[in-house]
Image: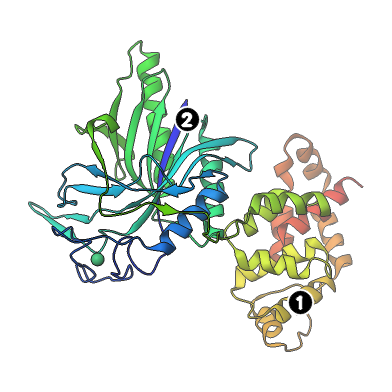
Amino acid sequence: MIIGLEVHVSLPTKTKLFCSCSTAASEPNSSVCPVCMGFPGAKPMLNSEALRIAVSIAEALRCKISERVSFVRKVYFYPDLPKSFQITQLYEPVGKDGLVECYDGSVVRIRRIQLEEDPARIIKAEDYSLLDFNRSGMPLVEIVTEPDIKSEESLRAFITELMSILYYLGVDIEGEIKTDLNISMAGERVEVKNITGIKNMIDAARYEVRRQSKIIEGGGSVISETRSYVEAKKETVSTREKETDEEYGFIAEPDLTWYDTKGITRIEPVYADKIAEGYAKEYGIDKKVVLDLIMYDRDALRLIERTKGAFGMKTIINGIEIVKKYGDIGSEQAFKRLLDFLQNGGYVDAAAFEKIKKGEKVEGNVIDMKKIIDEARLLLNDKVKEDYKKNPKAINFVIGKIAAKYKMNPRDVAEIVKRIIDG
Ligand SMILES: [Zn+2]
């Protein structure tokens, strides 16, 4: 299986790509003007913030940045595009030839990154359609990968990595991410278009791989076609639409000049994956545990950075997990109080969390290690120990029981329990 992706992400600008209409309107067709409705004679003006974010994305994905970028009209007619062309990029896109190193060690090359406008939104009713032009002209970045993804796991790893990099650039795409998948198993390329969301993307890939495998196993051959994903049925269906780039007309956009990218100040990228790897090496902890905490959480990352010298890394991680469980800790000072409390053997429940947050003294709530060890020893009878040799999960109930009773982190309890078993 070989998968290539085209990922469309909306940029967090206040105004649209080529006009000053707001991107935040909710009432349909309330944020429109002659430019984004495509009236004849209306002239587009490039939103420089959109270009800055697009260049930052391209650089974070290690692309070569075009020194000058230009735009083209991609000519086609569809009801969501009454002016009959979409302004996009072709010859001088924002970036080319990049790569993403995923947390599972795989590398996905980026073919190109381009800036383009979103068409209007079509809302289908029973026997008619409605158009909302609020979306028309919204800034999008399209990220096109090479066909480097070879399994469902690496598809997941890539998209998780990409989302994390985008998140730290301020482009939060959760939920609204739109993807086209190109999947080929025996040479013929099948494109699955317009998938919204990550779960759907993975489900669509899984379905398509299964569908194509079945055809190949049955001695048939897969035909090259465009399909779309039907979320309700979790399957892909053939669509009659079959456009390739050659079938579109592209002409240079005469209303826009080219833009110099040299002087643009980039947003500094953060690679959560590399940071987690660094912590794992330095503090001897599980990279995955740290990564899960910081991948989409700049507050968590900041708290680790600010406290790592003063507290043990395990305590810090435990502290962040507690913050994630009970909500905002309020201040860095309060977080340090929480770590102090944990370091002194305290356990935190909702009430203790609130007290620590407010700076009040917490009475009780101190873990009696001796008591816990005695209790664990009692539960770990010979039968459990025997079962554990065959199935490591056999001790899970002991861990669960103690963690629940003493409101402890199951991972810490697991460590204690394993130490008892090992004598
Ligand atoms: Zn407008």
Q: Is residue 368 left or right of residue 349?
A: right
- Residue 13: image location, x then y, percent: 40, 65
Q: Does 416 sit above or below residue 144?
A: below
Question: Would you say residue 16 is visible in this rendering?
Answer: yes
How many dots with numbers?
Answer: 2
The structure's colour scheme is rainbow
Q: Name the residue under label 1.
A: 336
Locate residue 95, reporting x and y percent: 48, 44
Q: Which amino acid does label 1 sit on?
A: Lys
Q: Identify which residue is drawn at 27% across, 48% down.
A: 253
In the image, 215: left or right of 402? Answer: left
In this view, 391 is above or below 267 = above
Queried on whether the Cβ of the residue with tag 2 lies below 8 angstroms from ligand 1, the answer reads: no
Helix, strand or loop at label 1? It is helix
Tell me the residue at 23%/60% (across/down).
43
Question: Ligand 1, what quadrant?
Answer: bottom left
Measured as percent of width and height from the top left, residue 214 is found at 38, 20
Please tell me the numbered disc located at residue 147: 2
Depth order, front residue of 116/292 = 116
The answer to whether 36 appears left or right of 421 in the picture is left
Mark 1 or mark 2: whose residue is earlier in sequence = 2
Label 1 crowd (10 A; few <14 / some 14-19 / many >=20) = many
Tell me the amino acid under the disc marked 2.
Answer: Pro
Nearer the camera: disc 1 or disc 2: 2
Q: Which residue lies furthest to the top in this view?
A: 219
Q: Position of residue 7 (x, y in %)?
A: 41, 45
Q: Which residue is drawn at 72% across and 87% down?
A: 359
Is residue 408 visible to the viewer in this orientation of the structure? no
Displayed quadrant of residue 136: bottom left
Q: In which quarter of the image is residue 343?
A: bottom right
Tell me if 110 is positioned left or right of 254 in this view. Answer: right
Q: Spatial distance from mark 1 to mark 2, Cα to Cα?
A: 46 Å
